[in-house]
Image: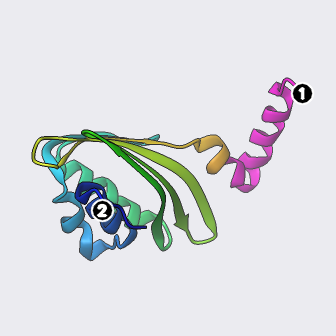
């Protein structure tokens, strides 16, 4: 996906081409004291963000991002994306805030771990689907 805002364009390109060898290029788009939060991690600092993504490559089969939507307004950016890991696809979104230099200072990922991940696991998935049916208001 292309975007006219150079900050968003750089992030989109970095995420869609992400590889273990490209981690330094991606984290160079983040401020030294940035914050990052997703359903499993909450870290501060560029080095910690790099470790989160390095761990992803160690534990997930062929991970890749496809950015579907991008909205930029002022220093705020919203990216809607699909995360592919083998046969698994997780739909999520990132809310980012840029500093005056155009670097990411805040990054927050939003995705439903129960629906997008746990429900797709054999044993846990069956339990999650059962709970969901029982809690549904019909």
Q: Where residue 23 appears, x then y in whole percent? A: 25, 66
Q: Which residues are magenta?
A: 118-138
- Judge from the rendering whether residue 125 lies leftward or rightward of residue 110; answer left or right: right
Q: Taking 121 as reference, is 130 above or below it?
A: above
**Vertical relation: 2 (above or below) 106:** below
Where, by quadrant of the figure, is residue 40 drawn? top left
Which residue occupies the extreme right position in the image?
138
Q: Secondary structure at mark 1?
A: loop
Sequence order check: which comes first, mark 1 or mark 2? 2
Instruction: State the residue at coordinates (26%, 63%).
Output: 10
Residue closest to the eye, 21 or 126: 21
Q: Are marks 1 and 2 in contact (CB under 8 Å)?
A: no
Q: Which residue is at the front of the view, 69 or 121? A: 69
The quadrant where residue 19 appears: bottom left
Q: Position of residue 4 (x, y in %)?
A: 31, 60
Q: Secondary structure at mark 2?
A: helix
Q: Is residue 90 magenta?
A: no
Q: Is residue 123 above or below residue 39?
A: below
* Label 1 neighbour load within 10 Å: few <14, some 14-19, many 20+: few
**Residue at 83% over, 37% down:** 130
Q: Residue at x 33, y 59 (%)?
A: 53
| 10 Å crowding of disc 2: few (<14), some (14-19), many (20+) | some
Q: Is residue 129 magenta?
A: yes
According to the image, label 2 marks what residue?
Answer: 9
Q: Position of residue 90 (x, y in %)?
A: 58, 55
Residue where numbered disc 1 is placed: 138
């Amino acid at each position: 996906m292309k975007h006219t805002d150079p900050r968003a364009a750089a992030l989109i390109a970095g995420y869609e081409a992400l590889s273990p060898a490209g981690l330094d290029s991606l984290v160079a788009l983040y401020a030294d004291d940035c914050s990052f939060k997703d359903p499993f991690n909450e870290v501060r600092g560029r080095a910690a963000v790099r470790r989160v993504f390095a761990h992803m490559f160690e534990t997930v089969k062929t991970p890749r991002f496809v950015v579907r939507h991008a909205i930029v307004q002022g220093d705020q950016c919203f990216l809607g994306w699909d995360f592919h890991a083998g046969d698994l696809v997780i739909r999520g979104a990132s809310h980012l805030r840029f500093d005056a230099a155009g670097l990411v200072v805040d990054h927050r990922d939003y995705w439903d771990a129960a629906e997008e991940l746990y429900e797709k696991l054999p044993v846990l998935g069956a339990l999650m689907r059962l709970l969901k049916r029982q809690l549904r208001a019909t």
